[in-house]
């Protein structure tokens, strides 16, 4: 069985979208893959209770309990390693990971970012996109590298930004596409249809089509 480990910090709606797809499509049978562990750096993350509801093992590694980022990550790496991960999925995990951690799991960590990278790296993406007057906002799934929000792009969804939008309405519209896109991207990665080679996400044309979404509703 291939093990997927999901790291969260809060709500966990992307985690739920992936798990619901895994159940609906019976990934355990069809891909030989399952979410084996959900880890949160925040004890109050709503996603933890949701994971428990699915009977998935959970762990809390509270970053505030560690004196340094390195000490926090050492424990995080130990817990993640124990689950023997084939893929580590950051789903609203709001801690920056050091080069040491990223290199330890090189090519196995993916993230979803709520913007069309390489535009709008970092925080507050929707407000910044609206301030810039973009017509298309969106979301990106990418490999995690030591530089923030800069790894090879795996999947993208472009979503219309309406004149009437504020950061909340735009975030809601993008989130709907995040859920669809991330489940597809996790599936493609875990089944080996996407691989990280020389800092590029390598895939065939059909997979690329599946991992590119457009929404104008
Ligand atoms: C999502 O919108 C995700 O793109 C964003 O946090 C939200 C988590 O929601 N991630 C980042 O901003 C990472 N820099 P969720 O907990 O409901 O999945």
Image (spheres, helix red, strand yellow):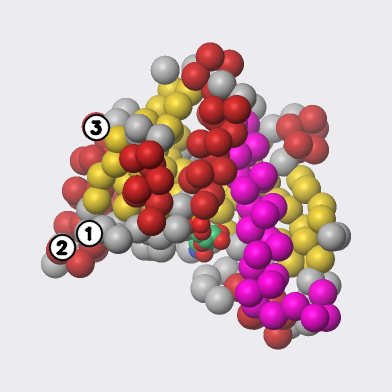
Q: Which residue is mark 3?
A: 82
Q: Is residue 13 left or right of 156 when viewed as pictured?
A: left
Q: Residue at x 69, y 52 (%)?
A: 177
- Give percent across and percent down for residue 32: 49, 17
Asked if the residue at tag 2 contacts the one at tag 3, i.e. Cβ–Cβ closer than 8 Å, the answer is no
Regarding residue 63, the answer to whether it shows in the image is: yes
> Nearer the observer, disc 3 or disc 1?
1
Considering the whole magenta stretch, tell me its main secondary structure.
helix
User: Helix, strand or loop at disc 1?
Assistant: loop
- Give percent across and percent down for residue 31: 55, 19
User: Helix, strand or loop at disc 2?
Assistant: loop
The residue range painted magenta reads: 162-188
Disc marking residue 62: 1
Q: Residue at x 56, y 43 (%)?
A: 17
Q: The C terminus lies in which quarter of the figure? A: bottom right
Q: Which residue is mark 2?
A: 66
Q: Residue at x 63, y 52 (%)?
A: 178
């Amino acid at each position: 069985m291939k093990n997927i480990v999901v790291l969260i910090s809060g709500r966990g709606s992307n985690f739920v979208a992936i798990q619901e797809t895994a159940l609906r499509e019976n990934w355990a049978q069809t891909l030989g893959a399952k979410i084996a562990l959900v880890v949160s750096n925040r004890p109050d993350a709503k996603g933890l209770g949701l994971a428990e509801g699915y009977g998935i093992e959970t762990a809390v590694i509270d970053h505030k309990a560690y004196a340094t980022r390195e000490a926090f990550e050492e424990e995080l790496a130990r817990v993640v390693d124990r689950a023997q991960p084939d893929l580590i999925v950051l789903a609203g995990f709001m801690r920056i990971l050091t080069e040491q951690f990223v290199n330890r799991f090189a090519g196995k960590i993916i993230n979803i970012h709520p913007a069309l990278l390489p535009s709008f790296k970092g925080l507050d993406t929707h407000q910044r996109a609206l301030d810039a007057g973009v017509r298309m906002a969106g979301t990106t799934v990418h490999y995690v590298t030591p530089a923030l929000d800069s790894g090879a792009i795996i999947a993208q969804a472009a979503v219309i930004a309406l004149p009437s939008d504020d950061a909340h309405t735009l975030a809601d519209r993008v989130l709907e596409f995040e859920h669809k896109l991330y489940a597809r991207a996790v599936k493609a990665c875990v089944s080996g249809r996407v691989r990280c080679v020389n800092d590029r996400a390598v895939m065939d044309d059909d997979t690329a089509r599946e991992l590119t979404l457009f929404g104008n509703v």
